Image: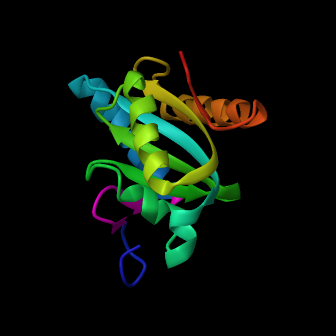
Amino acid sequence: MQPGGFGPAFARGGWIVDEAMFRLLLDLEVHKARRLRYSVSIVSFMLERSDAVSDEGSSVAESVARFLRGTDAVASVAQGVLFFLLIDAEASHLPAILERITGRLQTVFWSAGGSSYPRTAVRAEDLLRQALDLLTLARNEGGNRLYVAS
């Protein structure tokens, strides 16, 4: 958040927002993507431990946001899960994006689920549900993997 608690914070990359703002942005982007015909993807991401984050006391969301584009957003939600909103990113781009992030964070254990408009869902709620369900599946199957809705 900006000083004073209003608006998203910007960390030399993606925007850091709270969960309510993330859901609003996702809904707005899906409507805009429908009108302008581009892709919007989300990733639900859980990180068990990262050496890069623990040293400086910065949050995982801030660390991740540095590796995203200025058009993207990250939100930290309950139980250590992050959501990434990736504008103009297709489902096929998600493995490369996640590989770049996890490699720079020096992660030990992570799990992720992804979904993409319009390929896997057409409503914001469905994108979130798909990404969270696939995150749970990836974690239950041993972690260190990304599952993307098809």
Quarter-of-image position of residue 16:
bottom left
At horizontal 46% and vertical 39% (from top left) the residue drawn is: 98
Determine if the magenta segment contains residue 135. no
Q: Residue 17 or 31: which is nearer the viewer?
A: 17
Quarter-of-image position of residue 76:
bottom right
Q: Residue 18 or 144: which is nearer the viewer?
A: 144
Q: Position of residue 50 (x, y in %)?
A: 58, 60
Q: Position of residue 29 (x, y in %)?
A: 34, 39
Q: Which residue sits furthest bottom?
A: 4
Q: Which residue sits furthest left?
A: 36
User: Is residue 141 left or right of 127 when viewed as pictured?
Assistant: right
Above or below, comparing residue 132 to residue 16 in the picture: above
Above or below, comparing residue 105 to residue 4 in the picture: above
Magenta segment range? Answer: 9-19
Q: Quadrant of the N terminus?
A: bottom left
Q: Position of residue 48 (x, y in %)?
A: 67, 54
At horizontal 32% and vertical 27% (from top left) the residue drawn is: 39
Quarter-of-image position of residue 136:
top right
Residue 86, visible in the rendered structure? yes
At horizontal 53% and vertical 15% (from top left) the residue drawn is: 150
Q: Which residue sits furthest right?
A: 140
